[in-house]
Image (cartoon, rainbow, N blue to C red):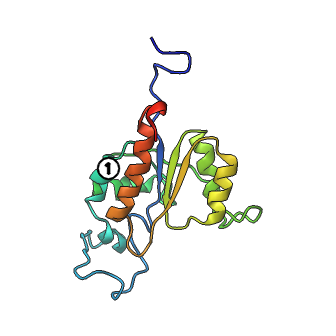
Amino acid sequence: MPSPTQSSVPAPLPVLFLDVDGPLIPFGATSRDLPDGYPAYGARPDANPLLARLDPALGPRLLALPCELVWATTWMADANAWIAPRIGLPDLPVVAWPDPSGEDPRTRTHWKTRPLVEYAAGRPFVWVDDEITPADRTWVRAHHAGRALLHRVDPRFGLTPADFTALAAWLRGHALPREATP
């Protein structure tokens, strides 16, 4: 029988908020910045040419993480139509945004920061984006009751093996019972 401080109901998985442009579709790198043999994975000629930069190996790697994946992108539901099938993801929930307005002038945070904290509703979360700043981290620490990892990805290269290592390590800490967490 669980003690009064333990719950027999498992805690919900952390949420992983996933941006598309930058983390999944790398951009901004010059040919000198890219490693030799940088892949172009292919897209139909009538499709968005940036889709050729999607790595189909990203979907299985994301699905292997112990979290609930949620789109946090201006692609909105189009991410389920155009991105998910190309990288092997199922349809994912989508964060509904207010009209994007750039930086929040009151807090100097990204316009996504407040809606993501509201969506998480106290649950642990990871935010994977290429536009995260120290102001976002400070605001989340002050306004989010749960743990959070704001993981900035280099938009020139997108998600790398090092990023997946960092995400998995952080998420594993939340998958353990509270008393077993380091």
Question: Looking at this view, is 156 or 144 the one in front?
Answer: 144
Asked whether the viewer can see residue 93, the reply is: yes
Amino acid bearing label 1 = Leu
Residue drawn where x is 33% and y is 46% of the image: 90
- In the picture, which quadrant includes the N terminus? top left
- Compared to residue 168, the image places residue 53 above or below, namely below
Question: Vertically, is 156 above or below 82?
Answer: below
- x and y percentages locating residue 49 in the rendered image: 34, 74
Residue at 67 percent across and 66 percent down: it is 103
Query: Residue 104 appears at what percent x and percent y?
Result: 71, 63
The relative height of residue 3 versus residue 57 in the rendered view (above or below) is above
Residue 139 placement: quadrant: bottom right
Secondary structure state at the residue bearing disc 1: loop
User: In this picture, is 27 found above or below 182?
Assistant: below
Question: Which residue is found at the position 39% from the left and 61% from the top?
Answer: 163
Task: Return the x and y of residue 179 as percentages of the image width and height.
Answer: 48, 31
Front residue of 177/47: it is 177
According to the image, label 1 marks what residue? 89
Residue at position x 59%, y 41% from top? 146
Q: Is residue 99 at all visible to an observer of this figure? A: no
